[in-house]
Amino acid sequence: MADYSLQLQADNLPVAEMEKLLVEGPWEGPLQRMYSAENILLEGCRGAGKTMVMRTAAHRLKERYVKGERTFGVHTTFKRYLATLPPLADGAGASAPLENFKAWINARILSAVKNEVVDVKGPEFVAELGDLGAIDWSSVVAVLETTYRDPSVVGSHLASLGLKPHVVAGLQGYTYTLEILKKVRVALGVDLVVLFLDDAAHALDTRAQGAFFTCVKSLYEPGFSFKISVYPAVTRYGLDFSYGHDAVIVPLGDLPKSSNIPAFKDLLKRRSAIAEGASKEFFEAVLINDDWLGVLFYCSNGNPRGLLKLVAQVQTQLSGRSVSTLRFEDVRAAINTVTDKHLDNMVPGVIKDLDPRLLKAAELLLYELRQRLSESPGPYESGKPRGYFAITNSMQVPYLCQAAVKLLVAANVIVPEGPARLSKREGGTLYLLHPGFIFRDNVIAPYLGRRTPAPSDWLEFFVGMTSRVHAEVGRGAELWQAVLDEAMLEPSGECPNGHPMSDPSASCEICGAAGQSRSPVAVLLNKSIDVLDLSYAMKSRLLGAGFSTVRDLFEATDEQIDAVYYVGEARTAIIKNTVSAAVDEFVAG
């Protein structure tokens, strides 16, 4: 089993541990911009380090404030937003009311502000700040995060917490929160309050996307700046928020390049410092072999969490063997195992369950790109390595295929480098194919004349890749129509009895029942805990204690999970982390 140090994520790390594990390196530039007065969209795929950068910046700003500086930072996350969306009523479509969703955004911000101000100034100070101190914002958030049960009773629940009607109406509007924030800034005596809004990229539901960014823009005011983490290519901003204008785009995550390898080596060193027992010996064995580490770095596509997953899988490959028996074949098997699951793990679960045709199109497109690199035109051009594609931006490409390209970007399967001019005078974009897939397909073996290339062979190939050597996919490529035709054969819904349906608006061909739209909330929360990445023994204990669905664990407190036999505090943290990762998979944007 992988060491606990490889499973820690920034979402749940104590601040002290976070500072120990932080590597600035290529992330130093974006981190420094987090302290500025500019409004920023921090754009990066899953595992790129958005949460680590934001939480670190917020904590450091708070420490600087205590020392006398006039800037204050507050971090909050919007990961659980789907629980605040009411189910779609028949015929409601996109016009379903989102008042409670907007109230939750505002309450989430106010709850985080209150907690941070209490931390540095104490409860007596906050008590003088009117509604901010008088209201239990954590309880308000808890109520709003369960509105999927029965939105009609939310008002009575909020009233029981002491919220007056004008407060509820204010939370559902656009000025109430700003007035409180302005009072807080004056009371703190600061020139700037920086609000770090993490996991905003999870607003995949079309009803929520525009509402979220409209709410945030309503808080724009001199003396405040907003840092918002989003995913590339797939986040929609609505009509009121202009991408790149209302906030500057700061990409997080470089294309993998050899100059970044030392930073990733440092990342593993810091994890090894908190590793347990024999795991320290395992870390040493990996860190001492620069070629292995280089291959792992490239096959993670320069993604911090991706590297940790690969190293964790290498440790799992040992399966009780002595560290002295570790070989490159173990590294190869680990990369292949993780890469085979990459698309499934990185694609948002809402798409998997609600838009299966888009997922199918992305799978087919990835297959076509891999085939081109493996066979024709192949991995070399005049002896130079090829890992890039120039893909057309033409609107003549079927919309489903255009969306599939964006989904592959969001899933860190292809990484955009910049604009390209294709041979037939059409515009396009240069993309690097995730090196893990290049390694998985063993594309260089036929050219080297041996079945298993050495680590140094792979490093030479990866380091030599350049966008100047690429394959083209123009608007006239046959693959677009082939991908569309095959993807459209995929069932897009199901009837109440679980039979797949190509057209959910028609009757089921098997049982005659009417089709039904899938609710994102139901899909997310009603999954069995079998979908969670936990050991069989752990799942058995949780099932025995009555935790049968993701919903059960999602809503459970730490104390309730801790009470399960043979769980304890450390395993509770692992379970919470795993549930959080599963939630990410279903609602990430």
Image: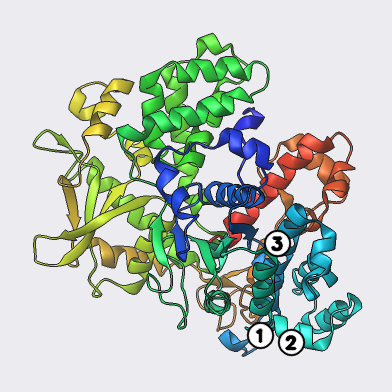
Residue type at mark 3 is: Ala
Image x and y of residue 4, in percent: 66, 31
**SS label for mark 3:** helix
User: Mark on residue 169?
Assistant: 2
Q: Quadrant of residue 279?
A: top right
**SS label for mark 1:** loop
| Badge 3: residue crowd in 10 Å (few <14, some 14–19, many ≥20) | some
User: What's the CA distance linking mark 2 and mark 1?
Assistant: 6 Å
Is mark 3 in CB contact (under 8 Å) with mark 2?
A: no
- Which residue lies under the disc numbered 1? 173
Residue type at mark 1 is: Gly
Q: Quadrant of residue 511?
A: bottom right
Up the image or down, 520 lies above or below 279; here it is below
Which label's residue is closer to the chain start, 3 or 1?
3
The residue positioned 34% from the left and 51% from the top of the image is 414
Of residues 526 and 10, the one nearer the viewer is 10
**SS label for mark 2:** helix
User: Mark on residue 553?
Assistant: none
Whether residue 85 is visible here, answered yes or no, is: no
Image x and y of residue 406, in percent: 38, 63
Residue type at mark 2 is: Ala
Up the image or down, 398 lies above or below 11; here it is below
- Which residue lies under the disc numbered 3? 112
Residue projecting furthest to the top = 324
Left or right placement of residue 94 versus residue 123 in this view: left
